[in-house]
Amino acid sequence: MTIKIYVPIDSTAQSLGANEIAIAIELEAQKRKLEIELIRNGSRGLFWLEPLVEVVHNGNRIAYGPIIEEDVKSLFDSKFYEGGQHDKYLGKTDEIAWLKNQERLTFVRVGITDPLSLKDYLDHEGFVGLKKAVNFEPQKIVDEVKDSGLRGRGGAAFPTGIKWQTVLDTQSSQKYIVCNADEGDSGTFSDRMIMENDPFLLIEGMIIAGLAVNADHGYIYLRSEYPHALDVLNKAINIAEENNYLGKNILNSNKNFTLEVRRAAGAYICGEETSLLESLEGKRGLVRYKPPLPAIEGLFGKPTVVNNVISLATIPIILSKGAQYYADFGVGRSKGTLPIQLAGNLKQTGLIEKAFGITLRELLYDFGGGSATGKKIKAVQVGGPLGAFISEENFDIELDYEAYSKLNAVVGHGGIVVFDEDVNMAEMARYSFEFCAIESCGKCTPCRIGSTRGMEVIDKIVAKDEQPKNVALLENLCDTMVNGSLCAMGGMTPFPVMSALKYFPNDFGVESKPLKT
Amino acid sequence: MDKNKIQHHIEKYKSLPGGLLPLMHAIQDDLGYIPEESYPLISQEMSLSVAEIHGFVSFYHHFRTKKTGKNLIQVCRAESCQAMNSKSIEIYLKDKLGIDYHEMTEDQKFSLEPVYCLGNCACSPSIMINDDVYGRVDKEKIDKLIKDIE
């Protein structure tokens, strides 16, 4: 009987040698005259265990990891293909606590299937949402999305259904769907995982968005740092075209939708939706004034839906299982689930999809297992480079857009970066300004100049040069940036800066908390 | 500068909406950089001023106007990698290659650039060599990777 072996093709697994392991497994099987079927699946998101090799035994998937090339021979020696014992044996994959304790809706297929197998996708309820949507009136699709309570997962948390309604209501012969795949926040990789490991899901979500607002063309604006995702997406789009999911008269519905991927060029600011649109139009990614909203005058001046990868990839399950099913997860106005990405200094890192309402403490210790270095966790940055640093006193606050907002913090795109006690928070605050200076588009003054002035002021505070005066100046500068910047780049850089100063004044050499915030 | 090559790319993207972005990618993928001498030609064909082309290219970190080494090493400087001591990786690589960021080794084998997030944050620190990402890198791993290239 053919032995089924899974070796992930996700780029994190590849970054740890998965390709070499796949080759070694094939060679070893040949040597031993064992008939195997090697499947390159997506990653389950248990990245501390990658490369995670699985075999099918008695109908169950059994996991081994983290595997290095040198383990391959001993895996065969211990008959891992029959579920044999080995140092790296982890048991049934589905029973691993990290996975078992999740609520995977958007990521339901990720890690289980071969990303480019249309058959796998269909066998795992793929295109069920689309098949429903082609028979719905556009308004009915928009209503479903509204009722689900889905909010933009890119970070801004704007209700997706309301954005779609605006585009639907705006009359135009040409409308666009733009997928923001410029996932630039450090500590985030959920977009990448969807694109590499379940690309048909994003395609399905975009087609449904097109049907909902009467748009017939979509762009995926993909960051240039993701070459593997580019390759997978282009292949998936071809397969979808060949099978009449994209192109003319989709599934005999008389509706058309085409899709193309455009590579970004390494500018963080192009994750901001109006900057992204400028870039797509072939210009410098300068942020636009709003209004007009992109939903009314977006790409090439036409009504445009701009949504993050995760938002779009969540649409199919909302359509297939119904708005209420999705809305039943979560807390308060944060409905549904959030793909959370654990990164930085943690023992167990990776992707966790959970309903809103989980606390940082649960994430850091129950899932994350504490710091990788074994030292005390000092600070956690939630929501990327523009997100606040959270200190232990707030680890028990539920992950929820509104609760975080009260803290002057953001949930953002769900990235969580952990620092142990060796971190110097004044250096991190300075880095926030440095990053803003490097990545600012330069259009508005608070961001362009404030970022550089901010670095200088922090240097003075740390050098105890007229400290009280400079602390007041820093507060003042942050206030100007928050209230005077055109977009979130300048408007949110003060969040990490001020939270660092507020919770870790000692790192700045500041004795007390002289702060308004 | 190979004018024919650039002309060929221009033909492909000239009438595409927003075509300047994919055009510049195509040129850089082909030549390894975007020669400034090509600006007048691109300007004429795309109906843009030379200043606009310069403004466009200089805006994006990904685009370069100078040749790089045969191998481009990008070191992630973002927060997650910092939390896993990427600073020591930066120092080690600069020292090993004898160059700073934005520089090329004398033998033109390597160029070094900073990058802000490779999306490999669960396995920090990370570096990227050409199109391949490497996670959980340490000094030994870097030595091996560079030796394999050499």
Image (spheres, grey):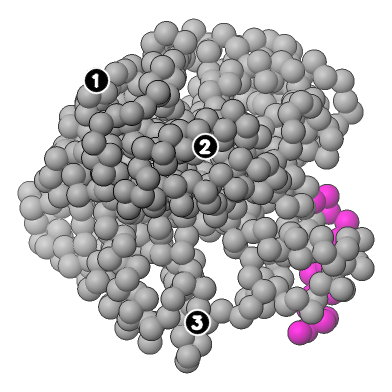
- Range covered by the magenta-colored residues: B1-18
Q: Secondary structure at mark 1?
A: loop
- Give left or right: position of A61 versus A234: left
The percent coordinates of residue A323 (x first, y second) are 53, 11
Q: Is residue A379 visible?
A: no
- Which residue lies at the image location 81% right of the left edge and 30% below the top edge? A297
Pointers 1 and 3 in contact (CB under 8 A)?
no
User: Which mark identifies residue A396?
Assistant: 1
**Disc 2: CA contacts within 10 A as few (<14), some (14-19) or many (>=20):** some
Please check the rendered image and state whether residue B3 is part of the magenta-colored stretch, yes or no: yes
The percent coordinates of residue A6 (x first, y second) are 31, 50
- Which residue lies at the image location 87% right of the left edge and 73% below the top edge? B41
Pointers 2 and 1 in contact (CB under 8 A)?
no
Q: CA distance from mark 1 to mark 3?
A: 48 Å
B102 and B9: which is toward the camera: B102
**Residue for badge 2:** A477
Residue type, mark 2 in image:
Leu
Which quarter shows the N terminus of chain B? Answer: bottom right
Q: Is residue B17 visible?
A: yes
- Give left or right: position of A365 versus A208: left
User: Which mark identifies residue B104?
Assistant: 3
Residue type, mark 3 in image:
Met
B53 and B73: which is toward the camera: B53
Count how many numbered circles sit on residues in the image. Answer: 3
Which quarter shows the C terminus of chain B? Answer: bottom left
Please check the rendered image and state whether residue A176 is part of the magenta-colored stretch, yes or no: no
Q: Secondary structure at mark 3?
A: strand
**Disc 3: CA contacts within 10 A as few (<14), some (14-19) or many (>=20):** many
Secondary structure predominantly adopted by residues drawn in magenta: helix
**Disc 1: CA contacts within 10 A as few (<14), some (14-19) or many (>=20):** few
The percent coordinates of residue A128 (x first, y second) are 55, 24
